[in-house]
Amino acid sequence: MAPILDISKLQKSYGATHVLKDINVQIDEGDFLVLVGPSGCGKSTLLNCIAGLEPITGGSIHIGGRDMTHVSPKDRDIAMVFQSYALYPTMSVAKNITFGMKVRGVDQATQEAKLADVARQLQIEKLLNRRPGQLSGGQRQRVAMGRALVRDPKLFLFDEPLSNLDAKLRVEMRSEIKKLHHSMNASIVYVTHDQIEAMTLATKIVVLKDGVVQQIGSPSEIYNKPANLFVADFMGSPAMNLIPARAEPEGGATRIEIDREGAAPIILHDPHASGLPRDIILGLRPEDIAEAGFRAGEDVQEAQCLVDMVEPAGADTYVMSRLGGTGVTARLHAETIARPGEQMTLAFDLGKVSYFEPGTGTRLN
Amino acid sequence: MTDVTATHAPAQAVRPARSWGKTALRWILYIVLGLFALWYLMPLFVMLTTSIKTLEEIRTGSLIALPRDATLEPWAKAWSGACTGIQCEGLRPFFWNSVILAVPSVLISTVIGALNGYVIAQWRFKGANIIFALMLFGCFIPFQVVLLPMARMLGLMGIAGTIPGLMFVHIIYGLGFTTLFFRNYYVTIPSELVKAAKVDGAGFLRIFVSIFLPLSLPIVVVSVIWQFTQIWNDFLFGVSFSSAGTQPVTVALNNIVNSTTGVKEYNVDMAAAIIAALPTLLVYVVAGKYFIRGLTAGSVKG
């Protein structure tokens, strides 16, 4: 089957400024695609291009197998939820939801049936006669979703829909969006700068930086095998430890040395890696560094480290140390014996390690 | 202020001294404000009282004295009997000229200004800023500068000396202001609203009528008051671009005051002046609170 959304060689520039460079993305029906990146990376512009609200400079966009590159937004069979919700302020909730149908000349009976349907689904039946100004943030969010759902489009577009909500409501609405996605098998493109939102919602993530796609993959691919230093650093909280190190071939394996101040270098042996250059950046997520004895596996190797700082965070305790000239965070269990200023043995899980080329930042393994 | 401190027990001890000073200040403030109000109301008072005095009383009495035996005679004369030059029909025909001139001009310039503002604020196109700057510039062109070119233009269009001709002048001249009002108002409306409506399938006019117009009451009121006051009170265009039967009320008022047959009828002049000013007064009274609201709409939102 043809992909529901097929973006090919998309270019977008404002005058001499190239905002999006050679974007190629496909998603299938039922996919939840999250565009993630720091602010100014072009993710919202890309979404506006998909919606047809911004003309594109080059390339093509197909939705549902049809070429939509030059089709106006209303004919693209899409629905969009905006960051500010963009509810029509002088219309009641019901009118907001049915406005699109009214414009398209859908008959009254169908309008009412669909409105009732969506209102029940989102539990906003009691709000239908209110104005947007009389609603709370969460309720406005629901109405905005209702306006999209009632269209029953081929493709849903969400532009940072949760960023105006408080933390608690954001988590609630996040799981509701996920539920809706499952129950309707909807195809969604979702823009966010929040990497946790990206990880929890997506079936497929596109990481953007300065208008260039850094990596496309499933959440686990993005998280476990980041394509470059930017992705490694951007996705995950706390961020992946990126430690400068030296690699030397050792038979079919690699011997890795990490310098540190006031002590002998840490020596690790990675039997799976080979052909690495001499200078590398070793990437290891905080949860892949554990207290000795709490992590088992053939690739787990231990080393003594000086603990600089201990940050209990309830479920976990974060322990900071200095290796290779940078701060390194390890995520230990809550009842760890770690004390600041003392030596402790940490276990490094080299089964999860990523290696990067320091100059270009690209992944080596 | 005073009642807030009064509710706090510890403040009671110091209250008399402090509140005495405050009360005195308050009173001084009220007295000064009152004096200013009197000062500004004085001309109106003189006009109203003079307009219902007889000529005899005006000649013998004091300017600020109350009328001894009030008469509406001067009002009746001003409305339908006073002479403007050789014609003695009072203000009435010219008052209706002004109504016929002002109402359509106000409506048309407001509607076009709203559309202009909507386009410049929400449908950005290449050169939009330049066009807006030029329209703004139009607000600052002195009336006198355009008199001759406009006369030539009206002549070429064949509407010189007619009410439609005068309407045309006022509409064109008002567009700079109305566009500015609506543009500044619509610029505060988030552009996502337009995007949402576009995705919903609405077009240019549909979005304007269904979403922007219902939001526009305060700024429509501002535009209507501004335009109505400008057009109704205008004298220069009225005197330049009208002919005998098509003069607006301001020109007729001038003619009444200046065509004297022997004795100067101050009471009729005053009555005529009040009649000529009444419509603008009425517009302010009816819509004044929206006027302030509309003017400050952008600044409150922040």
Image (spheres, grey):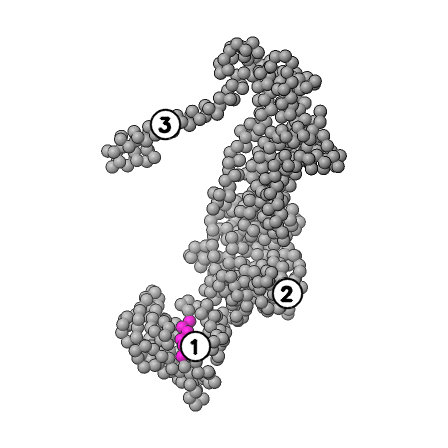
Q: Element type at marker 1? A: strand
Is residue B15 in the magenta section? no
Residues flagged by tags 2 and 1 on a common chain: yes
Image x and y of residue A217, in percent: 53, 71
- Residue where numbered disc 3 is placed: B28
- Residue where numbered disc 2 is placed: A58
Between A211 and B34, the residue placed more toward the observer is: B34
Image x and y of residue B63, in percent: 50, 15
Q: Is residue B210 toward the left or the right of residue B246 in the image?
A: left
Is residue B238 at least partly visible in the picture?
yes
- Kindly report which numbered mark, 3 or 2, lies closer to the viewer in this rendering: 3
Q: Chain of mark 2?
A: A
Three-letter amino acid code at the position of disc 2: Gly
- Residue where numbered disc 1 is placed: A281
Please provide the residue range marked out in magenta. Answer: A240-245
Three-letter amino acid code at the position of disc 1: Ile
Q: Quadrant of the N terminus of chain A?
A: bottom right
Nearer the N terminus, badge 2 or badge 1? 2
- Kindly report which numbered mark, 1 or 3, lies closer to the viewer in this rendering: 3
Image x and y of residue A209, in percent: 51, 66
Q: Is the magenta region chiefly helix, strand or loop? A: strand
Residues flagged by tags 3 and 2 on a common chain: no
Three-letter amino acid code at the position of disc 3: Ile
